[in-house]
Amino acid sequence: MFNKILIANRGEIACRIIKTARAMGIKTVAVYSDADATALHVEMADEAVHLGPSPAAQSYLLGEKIIEACKATGAEAVHPGYGFLSERAWFAKALDDAHITFIGPPANAIAAMGDKIESKKLAIKAGVSVVPGYVGEIADDIEAVKIAKDIGYPVMIKASAGGGGKGMRVAYTETEVREGFKGARHEAIASFGDDRIFIEKFVEEPRHIEIQLIGDKHDNIMYLGERECSIQRRHQKVIEEAPSPFVTPDMRRAMGEQAVQLAKAVGYYSAGTVEFIAGKNREFYFLEMNTRLQVEHPVTELVTGYDLVELMIRAAAGEKFSFTQSDIKLNGWAMESRIYAEDPYRGFLPSIGRLVRYQQPKEFSSANETVRVDSGVVEGSEISMFYDPMIAKLVSHATSRHAAIDLQIKALDEYHIQGISHNGHFVSAVMQHEKFRSGTFTTAFIAEEYPDGFHGNPTSSESKQKLMAAAAVMKVLTIRRESLIDGQLNGHDAIFDDNWVVTLDKMQTSVKVMELSNEFTVKAEAWQHKIITGWKVGSPQFKALIDNEALTVEVDYKSVDVKLSFRGASHTISVQTPFAALLAGYMVEKIKPDMSNYLLCPMPGLVVSIDVTVGEKVETGQTLAVVEAMKMENILRAQKPATVKEILVDKGQSLALDSIILTFE
């Protein structure tokens, strides 16, 4: 077994690997860029080596520097995590040449399966079902259009070296093929240094199902069940679960056996994932093989009981596994949500900045329930524009699918993040959506159910009542604290009685707040709720028993109002005396300025291109500029016909949120 390993990655996956290595008694070496000098993975590791500037191409992607770090620290092996160098065959070979063990599959398997075009050819040869398409390199958008017509629309345009949803487009028309081909190629060269593109049939009503493989160097290769990864946005997975509510035992066995068959064809060992797309009739087709650990591996770990990182390390060290396929059982159900630094209320645009407040759910494990958080940040950490926007992965495990979903929803309520926007409310809304809970969704779920974007989860009348009651109790406790002088009431209670007016969504409700033996009763004309809480004024979470149900509400103070977030919805609530509420009705609302003649940058990012000129007349939907943030390109389009008056930025310029890019006449 190794004495010391180096983790050639960052963020939550680096922290995750360090935890397992520590449990195995193995020392760890972290690597970091300028942007990650104070990152959590650097703090957790036994040693850390600086690689270079913040851009990944100048730090984490420099294989020779990582090899130098191994030699300098005495690290005997390298775990690449996922992304970065994890699927670079040349890196695995370079490590081997330097007599350093790569904790992953052999270089030839990475080369064969990491290339989507070549892997499809191998899959066909190995007898694996594949999606109809063009297996070969495509020269330009003209050839792409011809191929797309031959296959039949819709088609999927994909980067051969792609992953993580990058370099991928769905096209329904010739125009979309031309635009998608160029965009996918540009993203591919920027993210992977490889601009080869291929096209295949897009399976409608699809499910994205993947099989987890694990193998040692003694010809033992097994599958550990499947994962459902169909909840995606822009081809980027958002929620994953194991097992899949769609897969039958016979289908699982057939997919697993094909995955093993493919892995054996290339002499595979270590962890790997074979991804399939399944149609509504449960026919399935090979998509690609990821020759690395997957982001969503925790759900497999929780339903099988195997630590995949540990198995990878043991396989790399040459150990023979002590279990066989018949020993692998699936127990219970696991859910994983990816908590991203993005604003779901603004079209899921990336959000960067400092985590001014960061409070995550409490981890625990009991006989029937588990909550696990794989995170690479702490309060004060910086979310950088240079890397993936994932903050953490929240994983829940319970005896049934609905129990795992409900546990996930409760855990999501525990998050409190300030300084950046995040997708926690959106994920909670998905978890509560009837179509998701029924398991009848496809990869088009988000596009179909949120066609106009996310605007908050609908809140029931009862939930609104509970939020108003909570806000009223918070107001009473706040007034009480403000009234204390040297531990004594200063007469404030003589000014304020039990009557208050709560305003939510511009609707006023008169309530009476009464307290008896540490229990509050909030009574309105049509409802009343009992609340028991130990909430302290200023706490970012209001935890209480409301009508004997344990609930957690996120608290964000907004001047005299308070913003309460609960189960994927946010409401700004004011609690006033009856007289103050009467006066508030005379306040004039502030009118927002008209910004329709400006193109504003919707998120911090880098200008990739300016696609118009001064004086040019543009039409609705026309591309005006492209801005890149967190490795994803965002096309900014005209919202109405107009004439470009002035261009205020240049290609390659870094922009802040709401920077003016250009103006219209």
Image (cartoon, rainbow, N blue to C red):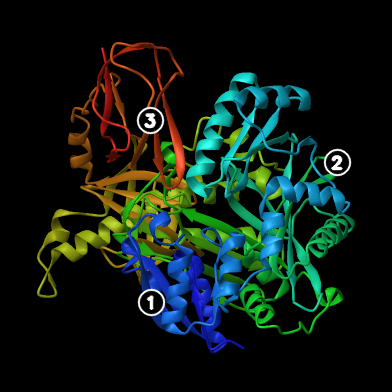
Residue 276, position in %: x, y? 75, 49
Mark 1 and mark 3 lie on one chain; the one further toward the N terminus is 1
Determine if residue 460 is in view.
no
- Residue indicated by mark 2: 281
Report the quarter where the N terminus lies: bottom right
Mark 2 and mark 3 lie on one chain; the one further toward the N terminus is 2
Residue 48, disc: 1
Q: Nearer the viewer, mark 1 or mark 2?
A: 1
State the residue at coordinates (74%, 36%): 205
Residue 132, position in %: x, y? 80, 36
Q: Which of marks 2 and 3 is in front?
A: 3
Query: Which three-letter amino acid code belongs to the residue tagged 2?
Result: Asn
- Residue indicated by mark 3: 609
Residue 244, position in %: x, y? 74, 55
Q: In this view, does 34 lie above or below 200?
A: below
| Crowdedness near tag 3: few (<14), some (14–19) or many (≥20) residues, C-alpha within 10 Å | some
How many marks do you count on the picture? 3
Between 306 and 615, the one nearer to me in the picture:
615
Is 538 placed left or right of 447 in the picture?
left
Q: Distance of mark 1 from mark 2, alpha carbons? A: 51 Å
Q: Distance of mark 1 from mark 3, alpha carbons? A: 37 Å
Between 446 and 314, the one nearer to me in the picture:
314
Badge 2 element: loop
State the residue at coordinates (28%, 18%): 597
Is 397 placed left or right of 15 in the picture?
right
